[in-house]
Image (tube, helix red, strand yellow):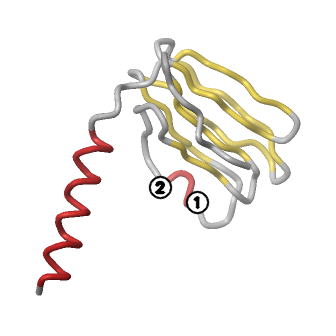
Amino acid sequence: MILVLVLAGLCLGSWVVLGRRPAGTVLVLDSPGQSQRHPLAEDQVLLVGGPLGFSRVAIQGGQACFVSSPCPEQRCVSQGWIRRQGETAACLPNQIALHIEGPGAVDALSR
């Protein structure tokens, strides 16, 4: 019972800490052979090429997500919107990653 309470406390604590991250200002889009930066303040739809074809990425209302992708399982699309500094979404089969950055952000993404 004590173990369950400790684990529940750790989960709640990490949820509180991660929820306090500030909103990001820039979407970093990594694809094979290139890296692009797009401001989250400008709503747009981007077509990004990967080994399987083109993935569609939307930036809207200060957040970003995969709208569609040629990958078979569509896990990238089901990840939903990302908006806070440090959040990441990726389409591994198509080798495309989205990462949110902001002022003073520390990049802890490793490849």
Specify few, some or many for label 2: CA neighbours under 10 Å numbering under 14, 14-19, or 20 or more.
Answer: few
**SS assignment at label 1:** loop
User: According to the image, label 1 marks what residue?
Assistant: 74
User: According to the image, label 2 marks what residue?
Assistant: 78
Residue at 76% x, 50% y is 95
Question: What is the number of callouts on the image?
Answer: 2
**Residue 86 position (above or below residue 80):** above
**SS assignment at label 2:** helix
How far apart are the two marked residues, 1 and 2, measured between alpha carbons? Answer: 7 Å
Q: Position of residue 1 (x, y in %)?
A: 11, 87
Instruction: Identify which residue, 52 or 32, lies in the foreground.
Output: 32
Q: Are marks 1 and 2 in contact (CB under 8 Å)?
A: yes
51 with respect to 26 (left or right): right
Query: On residue 89, which mark appears?
Result: none
Q: Quadrant of residue 97?
A: top right
Instruction: Identify which residue, 31 or 71, lies in the foreground.
Output: 31
Q: Quadrant of residue 62?
A: top left
Circle 1: residue type:
Gln
